[in-house]
């Protein structure tokens, strides 16, 4: 959690974000080609840096709490390597460095799934890697095309901020945006590019699943804002209604899939897919307030989904299964685990006074201003999320108790200490979201959104 300290300092001293030179790390790598090692913390990257700084330490603590699975130095090296790469990715200002880090992030998670996953981990990890690489195969070509256009205009560069001002033909913008969006859609994932998700989430260890849902999916959301909205605003605005329709289909599809699951880990996985596509609807709603809400909701989702996978892992350890129908009445044996799980389930449903309520309400309100039908369809997901979450809680925790095949001990103090900060964040933002929203408004820097 020590990585939170400099981020909290920046949050307190927000005026520092208006002086980028004081937050930059720059070193020329290949000046003739315009390839530089350039990192910069700005208002857009800050919420995603917080996500990384919170979720990754929690994933380590969760892994450590499983005494039955000995962890090696390689495991910690992979997670810390992933943290380093992710922090660099969220601050990269050179497009080639951005793409290199985008690809490099995949490999620590691939090895975490491969070596610490379930029985089908080899197939799941390979499927995950192939989908990711296939989605981003043409990104280097797109970057080179942007470089060529910048050279034609007399300023050859890979600097992302400089590329925003390069005049591009509309036809070229459409092709290049399609390449970038495909790569970002697979990693997030946007429906229908989610086929890798059920296997990867199901076979990964709990730490791996937390990293996939809490961190990796946010890389795609950040990239859509940084590259899609930042470099191609006019074309992005033009294709946003189509992408929003895909995202709404994804929200409803994943919610229905979650509602029919008999495995609570898969239920949470599909719930995550549904909520991520909800965030994407906010990005594809061409409105500055909706974009702010989408960024806030990306942060909220990372906290909530990390908490849900954590309590699901502890529940699995104690009842010896992830089946929803196998064990009932767990609340009688483990009341602490029950009520903590219920609190996070209510946050996933977006109950008022929880953090998800704020972001989802703003996205729905802004979408209603632009497309009433889409907003009505999106509202159905709130009902569906209540159905599948309450079904899980009812069947596992509140029905007539059955004997437990596994451990019957309730949560230990060390486990409550891991999960308590996440609960504090959920209720803090849910009850008093103003400071978070003020900070996130600074991230919506593209003036085209407000026109």
Image: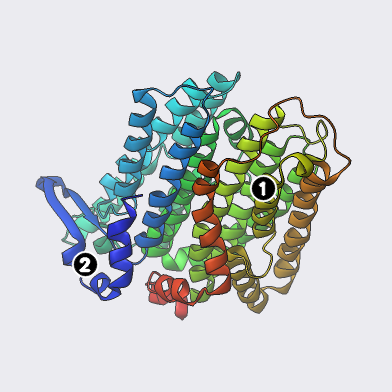
Badge 2: few (under 14), some or many (20 or more) residues near its Cα, within 10 Å?
Answer: few
Residue pointed to by mark 2:
20
In whole angstroms, how far apart are the C-alphas of marks 1 and 2?
A: 46 Å
Q: Residue furthest bottom?
A: 451
Q: Is residue 55 above or below residue 292?
A: above
7 left or right of 325 in image:
left
Residue farthest to the right, as pictured: 400
Which sits in the foreground, 30 or 395? 395
Residue at image point 53% right, 19% down:
122
Where does the image place residue 234, in percent across and percent down from the top left? 44, 68
In the rendering, which numbered label is found on residue 336?
1
Figure disc tally: 2
Q: Secondary structure at mark 2?
A: helix
Q: In which quarter of the view is residue 47 placed?
A: bottom left
Nearest-to-viewer mark from 1 and 2: 1
User: In the rendered view, how is the structure colored?
Assistant: rainbow
Q: Secondary structure at mark 1?
A: helix
Q: Is residue 46 something that shows in the picture?
A: yes
Choose between 247 and 142: the one closer to the eye. Answer: 247
Image location of residue 199, percent across then percent down: 61, 30
Residue in the image at 51% along x and 22% along y: 69
Give x and y (percent) for residue 273: 62, 47
**Mark sitting on residue 158:** none
Looking at the image, residue 78 sits to the left or right of residue 24; the answer is: right
Q: Position of residue 126 (x, y in %)?
A: 51, 24
Of the image marks 1 and 2, the number of the one nearer the N terminus: 2
Q: Is residue 280 left or right of residue 330?
A: left
Residue beneath the point at 63% across and 70% down: 353
State the residue at coordinates (47%, 30%): 129
Task: Using the rendered image of the protein, determine whether residue 193 is visible from the camera's viewpoint.
Answer: no
């Amino acid at each position: 959690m020590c990585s939170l300290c400099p981020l909290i300092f920046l949050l307190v001293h927000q005026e520092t974000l208006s002086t980028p030179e004081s937050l930059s790390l720059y070193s020329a790598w290949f000046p003739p080609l315009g390839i530089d090692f350039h990192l910069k913390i700005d208002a857009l990257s800050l919420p995603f840096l917080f996500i990384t700084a919170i979720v990754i330490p929690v994933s380590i603590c969760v892994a450590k709490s499983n005494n039955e699975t000995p962890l090696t130095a390689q495991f910690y090296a992979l997670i810390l390597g992933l943290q380093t790469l992710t922090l660099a990715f969220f601050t990269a200002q050179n497009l080639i460095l951005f793409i290199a880090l985008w690809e490099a992030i995949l490999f620590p998670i691939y090895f975490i799934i491969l070596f610490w996953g379930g029985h089908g981990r080899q197939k799941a990890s390979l499927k995950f890697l192939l989908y990711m690489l296939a989605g981003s195969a043409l990104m280097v070509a797109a970057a080179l095309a942007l470089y060529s256009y910048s050279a034609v205009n007399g300023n050859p560069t890979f600097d992302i901020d400089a590329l925003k001002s390069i005049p591009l033909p509309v036809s070229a913008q459409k092709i290049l945006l399609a390449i970038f969006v495909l790569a970002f859609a697979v990693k997030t994932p946007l429906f229908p590019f989610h086929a890798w998700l059920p296997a990867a989430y199901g076979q990964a260890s709990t730490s791996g699943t937390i990293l996939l849902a809490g961190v990796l999916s946010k890389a795609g959301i950040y990239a859509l804002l940084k590259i899609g909205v930042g470099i191609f605003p006019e074309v992005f605005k033009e294709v946003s209604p189509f992408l929003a329709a895909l995202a709404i289909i994804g929200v409803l599809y994943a919610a229905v899939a979650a509602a029919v699951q008999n495995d609570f880990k898969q239920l949470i996985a599909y719930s995550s897919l549904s909520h991520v596509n909800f965030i994407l609807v906010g990005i594809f709603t061409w409105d500055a307030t909706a974009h702010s809400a989408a960024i806030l909701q990306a942060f909220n989702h990372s906290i909530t989904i990390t908490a849900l996978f954590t309590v699901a892992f502890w529940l699995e350890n104690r009842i010896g299964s992830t089946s929803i129908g196998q064990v009932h009445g767990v609340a009688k044996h483990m009341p602490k685990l029950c009520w903590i799980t219920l609190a996070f389930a209510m946050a996933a449903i977006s109950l008022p006074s929880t953090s998800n309520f704020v972001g989802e309400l703003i996205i729905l309100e802004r979408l209603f201003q632009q497309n009433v039908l889409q907003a009505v369809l999106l509202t159905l997901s709130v009902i569906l999320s209540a159905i599948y979450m309450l079904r899980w809680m009812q069947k596992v925790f509140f029905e007539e108790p059955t004997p437990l095949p596994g451990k019957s001990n309730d949560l230990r103090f060390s486990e409550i200490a891991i999960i308590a900060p996440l609960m504090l964040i959920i209720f803090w933002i849910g009850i008093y979201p103003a400071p978070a929203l003020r900070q996130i408004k600074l991230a919506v820097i593209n003036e085209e959104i407000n026109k």
